[in-house]
Amino acid sequence: EAGVVQSPRYKIIEKKQPVAFWCNPISGHNTLYWYLQNLGQGPELLIRYENEEAVDDSQLPKDRFSAERLKGVDSTLKIQPAELGDSAVYLCASSSSQGGGYGDTQYFGPGTRLTVL
Amino acid sequence: SQQGEEDPQALSIQEGENATMNCSYKTSINNLQWYRQNSGRGLVHLILIRSNEREKHSGRLRVTLDTSKKSSSLLITASRAADTASYFCATGRSGTYKYIFGTGTRLKVLA
């Protein structure tokens, strides 16, 4: 079974430029997460989807970040414009929620390492 | 904000020794999970323990949970060089689907 796929793996951009990350979750997983991980820290949730609905985006900086999950499968996370402080690893994870969500194992992709110059 | 705090922040041991790392948290939880992250990679799920469980085993891993002290420990027995990684606890907060990750313990196992 293929795992969570993310692309690109690495991205270097100038500040104020836009950037987009793509995630393909494990087949059949209806829940998808985007996390941000700063160096030496644990992941912090940005947004969580149940199918195509964003059910928790309270931590997403909506002035510059946006996300979508069309048809409840693949997802993209966009930053426009990027700032120096956005340099981090962006992780995508998916899980198969069985109506409750409690105790779901999250399967993570390898992440996209963003460097903003 | 990160709820869990792992202790120690870094741990260096010899191959064959046991490694113990601890996680403390602040609010009520449904369950607690431990993840491993190798350098430059995504996180890999190791084990989940529910709030009504006190101890769980998986291979060389043993996890305990003390909800009265709001703490959990992960024990890796007979460590190997391949266990070198960062280990994170993630707490599933009561009444929500949200998991909050701790700051991680960086384990180095010397051959």
Image (tube, grey):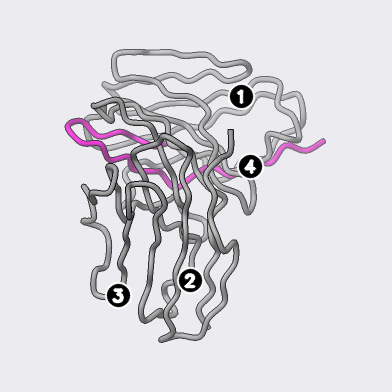
Q: In the picture provided, is B1 more to the left or to the right than B84?
A: left
Q: Nearer the viewer, mark 1 or mark 2?
A: 2
Choose mark 3 or mark 4, whichever is in front.
3
Q: Residues within 10 Å of mark 2 (few under 14, many from 20)?
A: many
Secondary-structure class at tag 1? strand
Residue B66 numbered mark, or none: none
Callout 3 secondary element: loop
Q: Which mark is residue A87?
A: 2
Going by the numbered disc 3, the residue's amino acid type is Arg
Q: Position of residue B36 (x, y in %)?
A: 56, 38
Q: Residue under circle 1?
A: B76
**Does the CB distance between marks 2 and 4 fall below 8 Å?**
no
Q: Residue furthest front?
A: A71
Q: Residue at x 60, y 66 (%)?
A: A10
Helix, strand, or loop for circle 4?
Answer: strand
Q: Chain of mark 4?
A: B
Q: Give the spatial CA distance, label 2 vs label 3.
A: 14 Å
The answer to whether tags 2 and 4 share a subunit is no
What residue would you read off at disc 4? B85
**Which chain is mark 1 on?**
B
Task: Give the magenta range.
Answer: B90-111
Q: Assess whether mark 3 and mark 1 are in contact (beta carbons under 8 angstroms).
A: no
Of mark 2 and mark 3, the one earlier in the sequence is: 3
Q: Is residue A83 above or below residue B46?
A: below
CA–CA distance between discs 2 and 4? 22 Å
Residue wearing tag 3: A64
